[in-house]
Image: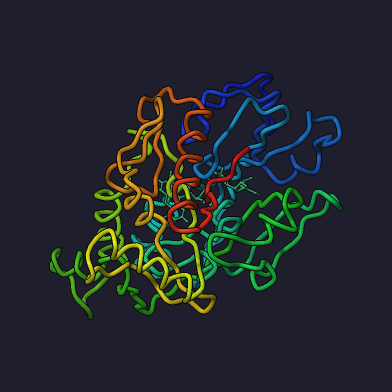
Amino acid sequence: MVTRYNNCDLSSRNTFRMKVKCALYVEVTAEEDLQALDWAALPQPVLVLGGGSNLLFTKDFPGTVMHVAICHSERSEESVTCGAGVVFDDFCAWAAAEGLWGPENLSLIPGEVGASAVQNIGAYGVEAKDIIADIRAYDRETGQFVQIDPATCGYGYRTSKFKTEWKGRYVITAVTYRLSRTPQPRLDYGGVRKALEEMGGCEPMLTPSLVREAIIGIRRQKLPAVEEVGSAGSFFCNPVISREHFERIVAIARADNGPDYEVPHYDTPGGVKVPAAWMIDQCGFKGARNGGAQVYPGQPLVIVNASGTASPQEIIGLEQQIIQTIERKYGITLHPEVEHV
Ligand SMILES: Cc1cc2nc3c(=O)[nH]c(=O)nc-3n(C[C@H](O)[C@H](O)[C@H](O)COP(=O)(O)OP(=O)(O)OC[C@H]3O[C@@H](n4cnc5c(N)ncnc54)[C@H](O)[C@@H]3O)c2cc1C
């Protein structure tokens, strides 16, 4: 079924709650709808929208916003195929309840199944690419459905070819995730082990449900709940810099904080990853406001619509202040993780 709304208000369809409109909103509920659509007749461009939790609408959208509300699930031995419109956390909750390992560390990430394969969502040491077995999509260039091998998707940190060279080409309709009955807990990241110990859970008694519960507990403490305050999660990517550049950052940090100060960082194959949240905090932005926009006091990597009525310009204004200040202080240009539309 295809549902259409002209001049549609998008404020309930993006988690930042930007009050913008699109010329046409189209919702499809079956694959056949995508083939039957007269794509050329739709107001252009066409944006495929999931839960709107990684987007900042910067103005009214002149074209078509399309939501793929395909919500079936099909299970086989140790995998499950979910329609693109399934809420990703519903899948995580289901897998945990069934005692199946795989997505438990990704619990409570907002958004839908389709976008999980676009974004390569990640949390607590696990990325979507670790569990994606297959992707089904409508190819707008050929008008055919294709199965896409995840090995060809160019997955990296919060990125894939769906965001770069394939941008706008594929409408994902389903994702197949690999699951396992064999315990495979990943606990060495972001305080997961400690949280489990506090809950009384320990190996070998762990279950996916217990790990999910621990992750949800950590996330609820750190991140704003989308039902309560508008945001799109981490606003900036964590930059990776050279070892020499990192040494310069250490010198600046020690001048500010004392000679024994340790700069948080992770060594990666491409260089040194420095948490953007740390830099934002060091530059005094924690809790900073620009009109209704605010750097979330509990997690400075997140910009929130604190007033509930912040405009895109207020969010962008705060973003620019942060980028410019960090550039001046550390010589690092932060790049937004949130897609600006
Ligand atoms: C409070 C909060 C916490 C968050 N925490 C995390 C986290 O821990 N880790 C993390 O990785 N992310 C996190 N995010 C970001 C966000 O949840 C993810 O990026 C999520 O995958 C976005 O899903 P969505 O359905 O909302 O996608 P949208 O924001 O609607 O779209 C994202 C992109 O995917 C494309 N897209 C969506 N559906 C399809 C489809 N069916 N076919 C083709 N393209 C499609 C869109 O065009 C867009 O380019 C967080 C966000 C919030 C608000």
Would you say 89 lies left or right of 262 here? right
Q: Residue at x 75, y 42 (%)?
A: 34
Q: Residue at x 34, y 57 (%)?
A: 278
Rendered view: 25 above or below 126: above
| Placement of the C terminus among the 4 image quadrants | top right
Q: Residue at x 28, y 58 (%)?
A: 256
**Render colour scheme:** rainbow
State the image quarter where residue 70 is shown. Answer: top right
User: Is residue 94 or residue 14 the one in the foreground?
Assistant: 14
State the image quarter where residue 165 is shown. Answer: bottom right
Rendered view: 305 above or below 147: above
State the image quarter where residue 229 is shown. Answer: top left
User: Is residue 339 or residue 98 the one in the foreground?
Assistant: 339
| Placement of the N terminus among the 4 image quadrants | top right
User: Is residue 53 or residue 305 the one in the foreground?
Assistant: 305
Rendered view: 291 above or below 115: above
Would you say 326 lies left or right of 199 here? right
The spot of residue 157 in percent (x, y) is 53, 64
The spot of residue 307 in percent (x, y) is 36, 25
Would you say 323 lies left or right of 223 here? right
Q: From this viewpoint, which residue is outermost toward the front?
A: 255
Q: Residue at x 80, y 48 (%)?
A: 140
Report the number of discs.
0
The spot of residue 128 in percent (x, y) is 51, 64
The spot of residue 200 in percent (x, y) is 13, 68
